[in-house]
């Protein structure tokens, strides 16, 4: 479904995970996922570089009822809203059951540490490949090399909308595999 020149995948969260994301993890593919809320869609209109980044993603999902409503207005309704935070919880569960390696990039050091502690306790099968707070020079190659070296299956990037997609787009080529998803303020939610 095309909205303001952005192609959204029209799929339920369940099907997206079952048919696309989990098989991508098992096949060790690289996958860049954007969950776009109305602010993100508007930002693509106002910022051509950001639009290029979003259009480079493998999958763009509708994160927000505003986007779903817009799709209804053009007569091509999206099935449902799929939020970054919901995908994060599903992927944590999957990583727990299947012993996958997860990297947590972003948020303050305090929140980032708390996320790692909670994940260790609540998802004991998951392997924490590593963690790094989100307060560093945005384009720091050493940090990206370090993260790539931890060989994560899933990389949650919580640097705030736009910044996180920019980071993923910039550094994706350093990685051989991995599900990359910007999760905005989700670490703050997870850490309570
Ligand atoms: N954040 C970060 N580094 C930054 C700016 C923000 O790690 O340079 C984190 C922030 O701590 C929070 C998340 O990104 O956990 C989302 O930030 P914010 O709510 O400001 O962004 P939004 O997604 O609302 O634009």
Image (spheres, rainbow, N blue to C red):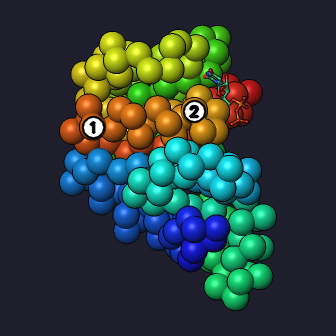
Where is residue 142 drawn, in percent x and y? 33, 13
Q: Which mark is residue 89?
A: none
At label 1, counting other C-alpha atoms closer than 10 Å, the crowd grade (few under 14, some 14-19, many 20 or more) is: few
Q: Is residue 177 above or below residue 64?
A: above
Q: Is residue 144 above or below residue 40?
A: above
**Residue drawn at (57%, 68%) of the image:** 5
104 relative to 176 in the view: left or right: right
Quadrant for ligand 1?
Answer: top right
Q: Is residue 180 or residue 103 the one in the foreground?
A: 180
At label 2, counting other C-alpha atoms closer than 10 Å, the crowd grade (few under 14, some 14-19, many 20 or more) is: some
> Which quadrant is home to the C terminus?
top right
Q: Is residue 150 or residue 118 the one in the foreground?
A: 150
* In the image, the residue with mark 2 has its CB under 8 Å from the nearest atom of ligand 1: yes
First in sequence: mark 1 or mark 2?
2
27 relative to 13 in the view: left or right: left
Q: Is residue 56 or residue 93 the one in the foreground?
A: 56
């Amino acid at each position: 479904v095309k909205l303001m020149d952005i192609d959204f995948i029209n799929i339920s969260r369940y099907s997206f995970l079952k048919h696309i994301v989990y098989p991508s993890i098992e096949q060790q593919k690289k996958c860049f996922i954007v969950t776009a809320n109305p602010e993100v869609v508007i930002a693509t209109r106002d910022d051509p570089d950001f639009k290029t980044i979003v259009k480079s993603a493998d999958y763009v999902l509708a994160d927000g009822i505003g986007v779903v409503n817009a799709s209804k207005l053009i007569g091509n309704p999206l099935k449902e809203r799929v939020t970054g935070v919901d995908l994060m919880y599903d992927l944590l569960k999957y990583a727990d059951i299947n012993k996958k390696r997860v990297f947590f990039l972003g948020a303050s050091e305090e929140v980032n540490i708390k996320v790692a502690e909670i994940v260790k306790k609540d998802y004991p099968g998951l392997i924490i490949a590593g963690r790094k707070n989100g307060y560093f020079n945005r384009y720091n190659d050493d940090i990206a090399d370090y993260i790539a070296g931890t060989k994560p299956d899933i990389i949650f990037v919580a640097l705030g909308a736009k910044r996180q997609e920019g980071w993923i787009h910039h550094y994706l080529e350093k990685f051989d595999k991995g599900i990359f998803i910007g999760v905005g303020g989700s670490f703050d939610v997870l850490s309570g």
